[in-house]
Image (cartoon, grey):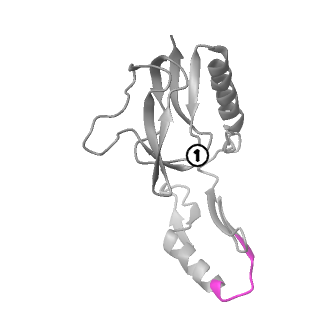
Amino acid sequence: MRKRNSGSASSREEKYTIDMSEVQFIINLLKDTDVSHLKLTRGDQTLEITRGVYSKTVFQSSTEYPENVQPRPLKVYDFRDKIEADLSRSEQAAKQDDNIVEVKSPMVGIFYRRPSPDEDPFVEIGTIVNEGDTLAIIEAMKVMNQVKSPVSGIIEEITAENGNMVEYGEVLFKIRKT
């Protein structure tokens, strides 16, 4: 810790300052010791070093925070309740619209929207389908299984991505009944 003049010629008050090279030097000295806590105060500055499972190095100067001002605690937001509320609202909205039918995957496999890579997709959003029309293919154990429309209507939403794995019961399409 170095002494420093306050700058005024009349008061010549000496202050101590702690620079980062000295902090690093002190930390290196403590590395090979059993000391787990060190608190060093010089003038209006305090250096506190704590070692252990949750080790930290703290440097605080009273010039940074006046006595009547304290740093605010860190506020942690928990978004789980908001996410659960949003999910329940979206599930309720889907249940309330009786004209929407969800087409779910009948098996685990790879979802394909096209009969082959060079052909157009079976359906797009806005396509009018009849009951029994092929909507997609799911490949399971090298067997191509057709996903057929359970109702006549209009494709409102396609929720699965082409070429991705789908799970049993996963919603693939939403069809608005006509």
Q: Residue furthest top?
A: 178
Q: Which residue does the image show at 24% across and 43% down from the upper left?
A: 118
> Picture quarter containing residue 17?
bottom right
Query: 132 or 76: nearer the eye?
Result: 132
Q: In this rendering, would 100 be left or right of 164?
A: right
Q: Residue at 68% across / 42% down in the picture? A: 76
In the image, what residue occupies the spot 52% across and 58% down? 6
To which residue does mark 1 refer? 107
x 49%, y 36%: residue: 147
Please state which of residues 122 and 54 is positioned toward the viewer in this rendering: 122
Against 124, is 78 above or below? below
**Count of marks overlaid on the render:** 1
| Quadrant housing the N terminus | bottom right
**Residue 171 percent across, percent down from the top left:** 57, 34
Q: Which residues are magenta?
A: 31-39
* Rendering coords of residue 88 (x, y %): 69, 27
Rendered location of residue 15, percent (x, y): 58, 63
Disc 1 is placed on an element classified as loop
Q: Is residue 57 left or right of residue 134?
A: right
Q: Amino acid at mark 1?
A: Met
Residue placed most toward the observer, 178 or 164: 178
**In magenta stretch: residue 37:** yes
Q: Residue furthest left?
A: 118
Q: Residue furthest bottom?
A: 32
Mark 1: give few (<14), some (14-19) or many (20+) Cα within 10 Å: some
47 left or right of 117? right
Let me know if residue 9 is in the magenta part.
no
Residue 8 higher or lower than 74, as above or below: below
- Location of residue 84 in the rendering, given as x and y in whole percent from the top left corner: 69, 33
Q: Quadrant of residue 47?
A: bottom right
Instruction: Give 91 or 32, whichever is nearer the viewer.
Output: 91
